[in-house]
Image (spheres, rainbow, N blue to C red):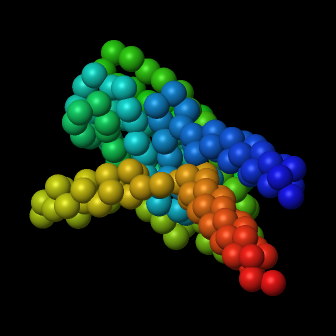
Amino acid sequence: MGSLRLTLCTGLLAVTACLAPAAHAADSGGVAVTPSSPAPGTDIALRVSGCATRTATAVSAAFVADARLTGAEDTLVGETRVRTELRAGSYDVQITCGDTSRKAALTVVGGDAGSATNPSPHTSPVAPVHAGGGGTAPHLAAVDARAAGPGTGQAVTGLVLAGVAAAAVLFRRARRNRGTGTGTG
């Protein structure tokens, strides 16, 4: 039984080790996009770390409008929308932060201009829509809270680790039950 447990634990550790890097797959040079693989027409949040300034701009042919990123303490956040008429594929995102510039890739999934799932490519604005009236601070707080949450890879890693813990408890309980049952008969 010892070799079975060792094999099981080793296998679970290997799976956990393979999944752990997936938590950082959406992070490209300090740039994180949520969701990491959006469909056309999806609102996305961007988070950039490592900027020395309090503002930055993210530009991409995939965006309806350039994303203005703001924040403090080395992390800037902002949001934009993916164009509805895009085809699936990889699109460059250029982030300008002060005098520095970096690139990331955005993978757009699904979507096909004029398809049944996207009949009209004119359903989203083609330029920024400024509603005015303030409200910027709550908006940024909401974006920051979503961008700071766990991604898919982190959620999967957490579930795997919870499964490993549950399996360890079950194995230990079964071993104890076998140990107490042999002394009575």
Q: Residue at x 23, y 64 (%)?
A: 131
Q: Where residue 69 sits in the image (x, y, percent)?
A: 32, 40
Which of the image's four quarters has the N terminus?
bottom right
Visible residue check, residue 73: yes
Which of the image's four quarters has the C terminus?
bottom right
The one of 5 and 154 positioned closer to us in this rendering: 5
Q: Residue at x 40, y 42 (%)?
A: 47
- Residue most toward the left? 133
- Residue most toward the bottom? 185
Q: How many marks?
A: 0
User: Does 138 sit above or below residue 107?
Assistant: below
Where is residue 115, by image quadrant? bottom right
Where is residue 21, by image quadrant? top right
Q: Where residue 163 sits in the image (x, y, percent)?
A: 65, 64
Q: Where residue 76 sits in the image (x, y, percent)?
A: 32, 38
Visible residue check, residue 90: no
